[in-house]
């Protein structure tokens, strides 16, 4: 359970600190806390739906864990080695992560999942 709750906390913190707070810098601590709670609940709900809809439950998610985690490597490397803010736009990094994430899920749950259903 420690991995799951750590991921929920990390997702909540990232959305709250990196998305919500820059959009509303004068938000009260209560608003920020509520956004964090809502984010945690939504991410938990999405993870629950994925595990329920997946053919083999949580083991399907474990099968794609490395591929999903690997999507963050380009963002990490650009953040580590970029010397100026203009080296790479953050939205292009986000688009790359999301497109890779979607590709992994489509391959795992649609392409490979159909092969399991037929056999």
Image: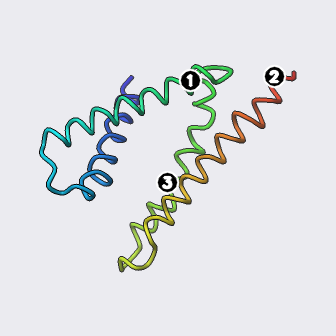
Residue beneath the point at 60% across and 45% down: 67
Marks 1 and 2 in Cβ contact (< 8 Å): no
User: 26 above or below 115?
Assistant: below
- Dot 3 lies on which element? loop
Place of residue 83 in the rendered image (x, y in percent of width and height, measured from the top left): 36, 79
User: 114 above or below 84?
Assistant: above
The quarter in which the N terminus is drawn is top left
Mark 1 vs mark 3, foreground winner is 1
Q: Which residue is mark 1?
A: 51
- Dot 2 lies on which element? helix
User: 71 above or below 88?
Assistant: above
Residue beneath the point at 87% across and 21% down: 119
Q: Which residue is mark 2?
A: 117
Name the residue nearer the viewer: 35 or 51: 35
Residue 72 disc label: 3
- Find the distance from the CA under tag 2 to the CA under tag 3: 31 Å
Place of residue 113 in the rendered image (x, y in percent of width and height, measured from the top left): 75, 30
Residue beneath the point at 52% across and 46% down: 69
* Residue 79 appears left or right of 114: left
User: How packed is label 1: few (under 14 Cα within 10 Å), some, or many (20 or more)?
Assistant: some
Q: Residue furthest right?
A: 119
- Find the distance from the CA under tag 1 to the CA under tag 2: 17 Å
Q: Quadrant of residue 51 in the image?
A: top right
Looking at the image, is mark 1 or mark 2 earlier in the sequence?
A: 1
Looking at the image, is mark 2 or mark 3 earlier in the sequence?
A: 3
User: How packed is label 3: few (under 14 Cα within 10 Å), some, or many (20 or more)?
Assistant: some
Marks 1 and 3 in Cβ contact (< 8 Å): no
């Amino acid at each position: 359970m420690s991995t799951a709750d750590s991921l929920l906390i990390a997702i909540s913190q990232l959305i709250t600190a990196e998305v919500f707070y820059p959009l509303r810098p004068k938000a009260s601590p209560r608003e920020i806390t509520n956004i964090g709670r809502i984010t945690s609940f939504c991410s938990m709900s999405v993870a629950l739906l994925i595990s329920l809809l997946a053919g083999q439950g949580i083991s399907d998610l474990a099968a794609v864990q490395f591929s999903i985690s690997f999507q963050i490597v380009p963002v990490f490397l650009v953040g580590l080695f970029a010397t100026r803010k203009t080296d790479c736009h953050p939205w292009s990094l986000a688009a790359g992560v999301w497109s890779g994430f979607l590709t992994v899920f489509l391959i795992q749950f649609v392409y490979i999942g159909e092969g399991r259903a037929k056999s």
